[in-house]
Structures are given as C-alpha cells and as structure tokens.
Amino acid sequence: MKVGVERRDAVDTHVDVVASGLFEREGSEQALPESLAREDKALDGALSAAWNRHEIKGKAKELTVFHRGGSAGRLAIVGLGPRGALTAERLRRASAEVVRALRGKAARTLSFRLPTFVAGSIDAAVAGRALVDGAVLGAYQFVKYKTSGEGNVEEVALHLGEELSREERTLKREVETEALLCENVLWTREIANLPADTATPERLAEEARALGKEFGLKVTVFDEKALAQMHCGGILAVGGGSVHPPRMITIEYPGDGRRGRTVAVVGKGITFDSGGISIKPAAEMANMKFDKSGAVAVLGILRAAALLKVATRVVGVLCCAENLPSGHAYRPGDVVRTFNGKTIEILNTDAEGRVVLSDGLGYVVQKYRPDAVIDLATLTGAEVIALGDDTAGLVSTDDALAEGLLAASAQTGEPVWRMPLTDYHRELVKSEVADVRNSTEIRVAGMLTAAAFLETFVTPVPWAHLDIAGPAYTTVTTRKFQPAYMNPGATAFGVRLLTRYLQSLGTA
C-alpha cells in the first residue's frame, strides 16, 4: 500500500473516499462540531442535518458514507466516541474499520483529514501513526492461494490542511517510518500464514538466508548433523518424527557499530504441531500451522531492525521443527540432553515448544552473552485461558526489561500482561530422573510452569518470556472480537512491540 502526507485539505482532493473523524456530542452540545464545517459544506448541509436528527452520533465504530455529486467521490464520517476518551488504539481500530468497510466498494484511494482525528493528548504525530497502522494492517488479506479477490484500498494519504501544515516535515518522517514497520508486519504475516506443507523448517532457513542476503546480515543454519554435534537434544527429539528435519537458525544484526547492548530474540518455530505421540484432538488441529509464529516474528523483528537501522545489536534465534508421530518420534518417558548439558524428562510430547527453546536459549546465552534475552512462543493453551485471545502473557526476571516491554506495548497497542513467577512454579517442573520435566501431573498454572522451565536455560541473564498463544493468530470465531487490523490468520504479534522496544533502547 502506498502511504503519504499531503499539505492541502482532504475535502478539496479528488480521491475515491475522504475520511473525517467525528466525536460524540458532549453535554448540551447541539450544533455539528466546527471541525466538520468543510465536510458539511461539501455535502450541502446533509451532514449537519443528519447530526441534528441524531442519525449520526459519533459513537465508536459508527461509519457513515455520503456520496458527493459529480466526480468528487465520497465522504466517510468515522465515529470516534467521547473526545476525552480518545486513544491511539481507538484511532488504529477506526482506521482499519474504514479500510475493511471499503473493501470491494471501488475505493482505491483514501484520504484521512488528519485534524479531525486529533484531540487532547493525541497529537498529530500519534494520530498519524495510528491511522497508518490501522489502514495498512487492516487492508491485509492472505490471498496467495486464491484465484480471485475483492478490490482493496491501494493508496492512503494523511491530509494536513492549514491547521497542521507547519508540521509537514515531522509528520512525513513519522508516517514513512510507521508505514515501513507496518509493511514489515505484512511481510511477516505472509510467511506465518503459509501451510505446513510449504513452511517446513528448511523453508524458514531459506527465508532467513534471503533476509541475510538482502540486508547484509550474518545468517547461520544448523542442520540435523550440526545439531547432533552440538548436543541440541531438545530440537532433535521434537523434530525426530518428521521427514522434514529440524533446523536452528541464527541471524545477527550488528546495530550502529558502537559498543553497546546486545539483545537476543528467540522464537519457537514448530512448523506443524500434531502433538506427536501425545496427539492432539482433530478439532482445530489445522490451526497448528501457526505454531511457528514466534520464530517467524523473530524474522520480522530482525528485518525491521535492519530496515529502520535501530542502534541496538540484535541476535535472532529460530528453533524450528515439525512435531509428528512416527517410529522415529520421541516418546513420553524419554530423557533428552540439551545444548547446555541440562536434561529434560519428557512426560508429554505435546509440550514440545519449551523443549526446542531449551536449546536455543542455552545456545544464545553461551555463544553471545547478551545483555537481555526475550523469547516469543505460542507456548500454552493456559495463556489463552488466563488472558484471552488478544493479550500476551509476560514473565520476566528483570523489572527494567519488563517495564520497557510494557511501555512499548502501550505505544503499539499489542496488549501484554505481566504474570508472576515464584518458587512454587519452579518446584513443579523439577524432575525425579532429570533436571526438569516438560509437563506436570497437576493442571494448574500451565503458563507459569512453562516459564519456570524456560528460566532454567537462560539464568542468570535478564530474561523476558512472551507467551503469544492467544494473539498470534485469529480464527473465524475469535475474529469477531478482535480489532479490525487483526486479520483472520496470522497477526505477526510481537513484531511492532519488539521493534518499538529496540528503538527505545537506542534513544535511552
């Protein structure tokens, strides 16, 4: 999607649709807000008439489209709710709802009249970034396997008018950066949406190699022979049942070249998760092609770091395997030895994500000695039970790291909730025959026992774990309750969040 900033007023342009924001009336307010006077004039008073008759109220999610005469195009009036309750997230959702509503409606070009979307603490820069987020992400559709599709918005412009014309240079820079980040999210979604017959561990390795070639990044792919020599028993065990052998992939982004922090980002890349010998029920198993979302997000984060030239050095690790039952599959009762020498008792082969991550975490800590480690994983159904489909669970051993991620979450609208990690959870993952066990006999605190397991392989480095099982993808059912910019399928959750966090380190 082409995104830009224009100085002139949007109402004066000849685009397919001009979108303007409308707040709910406050108290005894009767007249149409003065901010929409230009729109009302262009509609020969039809807008104020609809306002006076309470046909338009300005409520959130309200969208009314007026047709202007001749070739002047349409005016879309977007409800924003109470002026005092405006947030970037509300604008993000409103923008996406406009784009989605225009799908298949012969609307190729769309302009937002930016001054009508600014109020209170939401200045032009914040509003502009949010509108770009919603438009670009909301327009996305995964159409690789479709033979036909609906027409979509292809060009979006933010129009400043006289009110904001002095901010043109700053806003152009902000919008250009945000559009790059959003397009990177779409790049990530395209890979995450690929089915398991295409997105094998080796295919993810190919994507990493292509990324390295494009941006000059160092990429190393460890195949099954190299993993065996490195004693990465976790990844080898999980991937042993498939004809597609496992891979561990590292990507190194050098940062701005100055001596500074190194942040490692480690992702779970189960390209398909049948559960293995502990096989899952058939219902919804097709969604397990999204169990690679953490690793694919790492690809997107490294690509964003290179695109936006973040100052911090970033090391990405993708732990990739396909978890299938066969005569070569690992079994309940097995004990596997991981890269750092610690052992895992396997009690449930469907608790495989933590097993592959054990090697990736141990390797990155020993090899790169990072200042912080962050892992992303569609790890537990317990996370979804606890926090729902829209919020990721955060567990961290470092308050500063956790607070940085929460601050980035507030800016990007990717919700995160911090959860506790105590000795109770650590006791539950201790094994009688190995160092740790990958499952417990009691069905409590599943998200937190999984985190306690991972902590074993990263201590003492400051560490944060993001369980993205809920928000990593949406289904036809969950889609009804998600923001309009969270399309059906993979969402690339975590890419904007971690990129914003990395950018904040460079400006601290």
Image: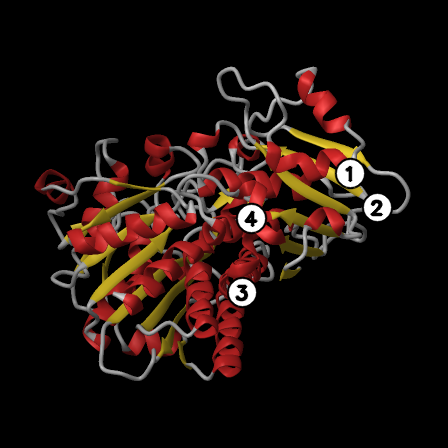
Q: Residues within 10 Å of mark 4 (few under 14, many from 20)?
A: many
The numbered disc on residue 72 is 2
486 left or right of 161 in image: left
Q: Which residue is at 58% across, 41% downward?
A: 116
Q: Secondary structure at mark 2?
A: loop
**Looking at the picture, does residue 310 appear above or below residue 88?**
below
The disc, 1 or 3, on the residue closer to the chain's N-terminal end is 1
Quadrant location of residue 39? Answer: top right
- The kind of residue tagged 1 is Ala
Crowd around label 2: few <14 · some 14–19 · many ≥20 (10 Å): some
Residue drawn at 63 percent across, 53 percent down: 159
The residue under label 2 is which amino acid type? Ala
Residue at 66% over, 50% down: 141
Q: CA distance from mark 1 to mark 3?
A: 34 Å
How many neighbours does mark 3 have within 10 angstroms: few (below 14), some (14-19), or many (20 or more)? some
Locate residue 289 relative to residue 309 in the image: left or right.
Answer: right
Q: Nearer the viewer, residue 69 or 148?
A: 69
Task: Kindly identify which residue carries mark 4.
Answer: 131
Q: Secondary structure at mark 1?
A: helix
Between marks 2 and 3, how big is the CA–CA gap? 30 Å
Q: Mark 2 or 3 closer to N-term?
A: 2
Residue 175 shows in the view: no
